[in-house]
Amino acid sequence: MKHITAKTKICMVIGDPIDHSLSPQIHNAGYEALGINDQFVYVASQVKIEHIADFLKGVKTMGIRGVSCTMPHKLIVMEYLDILDETAKTIGAVNTIVNEKGRLKGYNTDWLGVITPLEKLTSLSGKKVAVLGAGGAARAIIYGLTKKDAKVTIYNRTKEKAEALAMEFGCNVALLTDTKKLAASDIIINATSVGMKPHENQTPIDTKSIQKNQIVFDAIYTPFETKLLKEAKKHGAKTIPGIEMLLYQGIAQFELYTGKNAPEDIMRKVLYRYAKH
Ligand code: ATR
């Protein structure tokens, strides 16, 4: 701990609950790898939603450099920030707060968590993408996909929610049971909570829809590999696990807090090591 001095800046993640967060491990590993662990340290705090206003005052008072927000804080923090970046405004949620000389600016890096790993495999322009779900996670994903000119169809259990989102972002709507339409997609992304622990035996769609030329991405990272991804592999599709989303939204936060390129491979290694336990 010799490297921590009075000049070290604090970054942190807040949520409720928070004790399972892997953000401290990946950010601190990144600081260490770049030799900036004398400049930055990353911690976590469980903050109750009714204490958000007090907490954000504290961020200014203490000069905390960056705050990553997870559930249930992504919406409420917006009310107390000095500036909102355009992307955060459009997505309607903040997962990243940067303290710029006492002014708090809200960003959203969740969409990059999906777009960056997808773009490592393919270009998104003109691709037919099936987004399963129409909640908060789906919103950030759909924002990113439409920004990259993909042709998005939203599949959701509650049709009205899918229609409202489709109207806002200029997408199509279909039913989760539309196996034929799903099979004709280039990419399938699960943004529902179906398949998450403790319901690991479920899949949001009939896996007969999956084709070998498709890419299947699951935003869920508990379990590490969902049943949807296991089935997709069996069908010969390329798969991306939800942990990659966690990694790339974190990498974008790291770069906003430190102003430096994140050491991606080291951060991935640390994340995978902890996530697989
Ligand atoms: P998040 O912020 O993680 O996206 P959310 O806003 O609660 O969470 O959204 C959850 C998504 O999972 C919704 O699209 C929800 O569908 P509805 O809009 O019909 O509620 C979807 N979902 C949850 N349980 C589901 C289930 N058993 N079958 C199908 N979809 C489900």
Image (tube, helix red, strand yellow):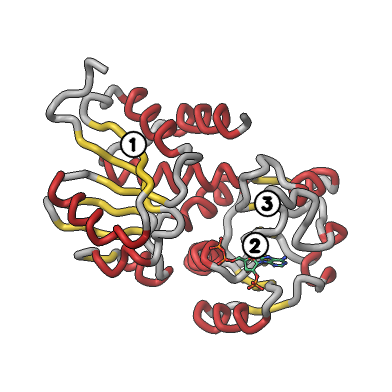
Please state which of residues 185 and 274 is positioned toward the viewer in this rendering: 274
Ligand 1 within 8 Å, label 1 CB: no
Q: Amino acid at mark 2?
A: Thr
Give the left or right position of residue 207, taking residue 72 as reference. Answer: right
Q: Amino acid at mark 1?
A: Val
Disc number placed over residue 155 in the picture, else none: none
Q: Residue at x 22, y 65 (%)?
A: 83
Circle 3 packing at 10 Å, graded few (<14), some (14-19), many (20+), is many
To which residue does mark 2 refer? 192
Q: Earlier in the sequence, mark 2 or mark 1?
A: 1
> Of the residues tagged 2 and 1, which is closer to the observer?
1
Q: Secondary structure at mark 1?
A: strand
The percent coordinates of residue 205 (x first, y second) are 79, 63
The percent coordinates of residue 69 (x first, y second) are 38, 53
Q: Earlier in the sequence, mark 3 or mark 1?
A: 1
To which residue does mark 3 refer? 196
Q: Amino acid at mark 3?
A: Met
Please state which of residues 173 and 276 is positioned toward the viewer in this rendering: 276
Residue at the outermost right position? 208
Distance from disc 3 to disc 1, alpha carbons, whole Å, reads 26 Å
Q: Residue at x 20, y 35 (%)?
A: 9
Judge whether 153 appears above or below 250 on screen.
Answer: below
In which image quadrant can residue 203 be found?
A: bottom right
Q: Secondary structure at mark 2?
A: loop
Which part of the image, by quadrant, shows the N terminus?
top left
Which part of the image, by quadrant, shows the C terminus?
top right
The percent coordinates of residue 265 (x first, y second) are 49, 29
Give the left or right position of residue 235, taking residue 136 as reference. Answer: right
Disc number placed over residue 43 in the picture, else none: 1
Distance from disc 2 to disc 1, alpha carbons, whole Å, reads 29 Å
Ligand 1 within 8 Å, label 2 CB: yes
Judge whether 65 appears above or below 145 on screen.
Answer: above
